[in-house]
């Protein structure tokens, strides 16, 4: 998140906090229906600004999880060996990391205004 802030001209400290707080509600509400929406409600009650709460909803979470899954099937189990082309191929396989919402990955890149290949490469 800090790297994206630097790239897009945002506040690195604030974006770093977005990344840290994204999952604060996950242990209590781990379902797709609740996480991170319940946490965003709490942040609103605590006075966090709208831009911050919205950023928590789009914290590259799905892509990070998918990239981790991709790394675990490489011989080295390292993100360093994951290639954009293989990520895109695995995204087409419904059976691979089936719980990851591919639309969230695509929409995340769109919301940031970047091409999917660029988003995958940058997050890697």
Image (cartoon, grey):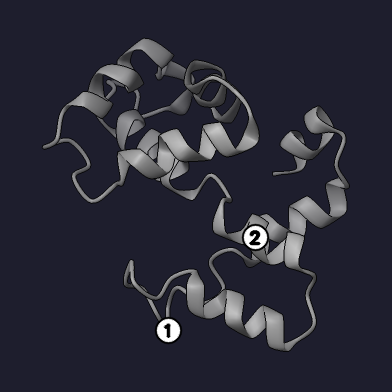
- Residue 41 at x, y percent in the picture: 59, 81
Tag in front: 2 or 1: 2
User: Vertical placement of 120 versus 60: above or below?
Assistant: above
N-term-proximal mark, 2 vs 1: 1
- Residue 71 at x, y percent in the picture: 35, 30
Mark 2 burial class by Cα count in 10 Å: few <14, some 14-19, many 20+: few
Residue sitting at 49 percent across and 49 percent down? 61
Q: Nearer the viewer, residue 124 or 117?
A: 117
Name the residue tied to disc 1: 28
User: Vertical placement of 52 versus 121: above or below?
Assistant: below
The quadrant of the rendering that contains the N terminus is top right
Label drawn at residue 38: none
Give left or right: position of 3 versus 33: right
Q: Are marks 2 and 1 in contact (CB under 8 Å)?
A: no
Q: Which element type, helix, strand or loop, lies under badge 2? A: helix
Name the residue tied to disc 2: 54
- Residue 29 at x, y percent in the picture: 40, 80
Residue sitting at 55 percent across and 26 percent down? 119
Q: CA distance from mark 2 to mark 1?
A: 20 Å
Give left or right: position of 117 versus 48: left
Residue 52 picture quarter? bottom right
Residue sitting at 42 percent across and 27 percent down? 78
Residue 79 picture quarter? top left
- Residue 3 at x, y percent in the picture: 75, 35
Total marks shown come to: 2
Residue 90 picture quarter? top left
Mark 1 burial class by Cα count in 10 Å: few <14, some 14-19, many 20+: few
The residue sitting at the left extreme is 95
The residue sitting at the top extreme is 85
Residue sitting at 59 percent across and 39 percent down? 111
Q: Which element type, helix, strand or loop, lies under badge 1? A: loop
User: Vertical placement of 44 versus 105: above or below?
Assistant: below
């Amino acid at each position: 998140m800090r790297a994206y802030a630097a790239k897009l001209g945002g506040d690195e400290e604030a974006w770093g906090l977005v990344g840290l707080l994204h999952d604060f509600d996950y242990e209590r509400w781990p379902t797709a229906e609740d996480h991170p929406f319940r946490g965003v409600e709490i942040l609103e009650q605590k006075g966090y600004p709208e831009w911050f709460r919205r950023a928590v909803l789009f914290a590259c979470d799905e892509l990070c999880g998918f990239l981790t899954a991709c790394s675990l099937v490489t011989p080295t189990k390292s993100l360093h060996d994951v290639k954009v082309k293989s990520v895109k191929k695995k995204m087409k396989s419904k059976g691979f990391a089936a719980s990851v919402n591919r639309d969230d990955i695509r929409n995340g890149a769109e919301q940031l205004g970047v091409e999917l290949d660029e988003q995958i490469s940058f997050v890697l």
